[in-house]
Image (cartoon, coloured by chain):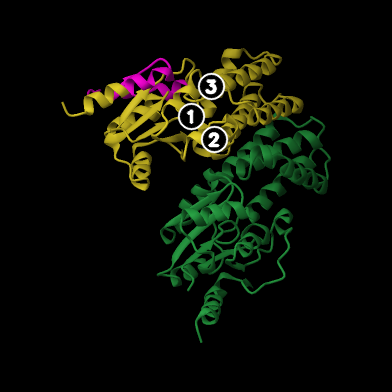
Chain colours: A yellow, B green
Amino acid sequence: MLDTIAFDADDTLWHTETLYRRVERRLTEILASYGVAAGETLEVLHRIEVDNLAYFGYGIRGFLLSMIETATRVTGGAVRGADVQAIVDMGREMTGHPVALLEGVEETLAGLDGRRLMIITKGDVLDQESKIRRSGLAHFFPLVEILIDKTPAAYADLFARHAIDPGRFLMVGNSLRSDIVPILALGGYAVHVPYPDSWAHESEAELPEDRAHFFEIGSLRELAGVLEKIEATGRPA
Amino acid sequence: MLDTIAFDADDTLWHTETLYRRVERRLTEILASYGVAAGETLEVLHRIEVDNLAYFGYGIRGFLLSMIETATRVTGGAVRGADVQAIVDMGREMTGHPVALLEGVEETLAGLDGRRLMIITKGDVLDQESKIRRSGLAHFFPLVEILIDKTPAAYADLFARHAIDPGRFLMVGNSLRSDIVPILALGGYAVHVPYPDSWAHESEAELPEDRAHFFEIGSLRELAGVLEKIEATGRPA
């Protein structure tokens, strides 16, 4: 009954936030040497990141530019060139950082053999293509879509391009706002796998009243059970 | 006979290099206040840009990070935070800078009515989608492909996805290396429209000995004449 199963990538298939959080921590350490409290650095950084989305988009490069702006801002321009360079170097390291898969990912994907699997991710194409390549998971996914943003319109366009019937489509992801709510709005099935460390910006979303197509699991290992449940219900009595 | 006409975008449909050159000039002015000669700034910048391609890719964000690295490098770390911030601000301005079309572009595209037109561009998806939108040319192009790099393999893959017969395909662009040589290698037609200010990295390419499918024009206004010539030759006597 479900013929396409799509997965978000960052923090659904592999860890991303933990890497960003680690680099942020290093930024707070650098700026602590100017007498700036970690809390202030993070608050300014997160504000600048949101402001910069419209200019620099998602991904490592935008994050890096936001970190640099944070450094000039919270030090009142006193940041030293060597520290600016250290921030750029952290970003360069991030681009090649090993991709750490979430627990159960490979077995789960292998168990879905025979279905059409898809990655639908968001953000920076350079980062995403690099991570898909480095993850070792590319062979599971004949279709990869990297969207600028995961809006209902972007999903509707994607469904049209691939002749996807939303009633036979299931999306798995960690973000209610990006992976779940738009899919439910289009009549698809959606499975939420919360990631403990998600960026606050991503959690701001309200589920619809009708949650017949909505499921929540603690780990990808539980996905097979959800599919069974959906397909048992969908089958004529 | 030719059923798909594809155009490179940057410096083929609209000016890009001039904007980059202008921003580079402002960088040299900022760094001149530290006693660094413009020539040194540009030399270091261009070296860092090439080194950073593998990490930060093409586009404004990578350029911006390379400018920041140049500033820390040529000042020996003495660059002030306010100047780092000025560089970031220049980059933010670039993301919304008005898109200036090259001479004759709109008339040429309007005159190709009835053919399948395509943009095949390279580099940063965020920058490219933004420029296509801001150019006012989007309605001419039912197909837009933004490649990470314009290699023969990337073009071959694109031809397969769109069921394009290279012998009926013509590509128009300003870069021998990216737009012309790979297309000729695949058996397509290619029209070179040199841009006066092209980045040296882009010009390093050798044309094949057999140039039957190669044309060079001074302005897009001459494209119609080239099409006529190709189709007259292709027609059975």
Q: How many numbered dots are placed on residues in this image?
A: 3
Q: Considering only vertical position in the picture, is B157 above or below A58? A: below
Chain letter of the residue beneath label 2 in the structure image? A
Gap in angstroms between the C-alphas marked 3 and 1: 12 Å
Q: Amino acid at mark 2?
A: Gln
- Is label 1 in contact with label 2 (beta carbons under 8 Å)? yes
Residue at the spot x=53%, y=28% of the render?
Answer: A49
Viewer-side residue, A102 vs B64: A102
Amino acid identity at mark 3: Glu
Q: Chain of mark 1?
A: A
Q: Position of residue B58 (x, y in %)?
A: 63, 45
The subunit letter for the residue under badge 3 reads: A
x, y percent for residue B45: 75, 43
In the picture, measured across the screen, residue A31 lies left or right of residue B156, that is right
Stretch of the chain drawn in magenta: A199-227
* The disc label shown at residue A17, or none: 3
Q: Are marks 3 and 1 in contact (CB under 8 Å)?
A: no
Task: Tell me which residue sits at (56%, 55%) in the image.
Answer: B156
Q: Residues within 10 Å of mark 2 (few under 14, many from 20)?
A: some
**Circle 1: element type:** loop
What residue appears at the point 71 percent right and 14 percent down from the top-left corner?
A33
Q: Identify the mark at residue A9; answer none if there is no mark.
A: 1
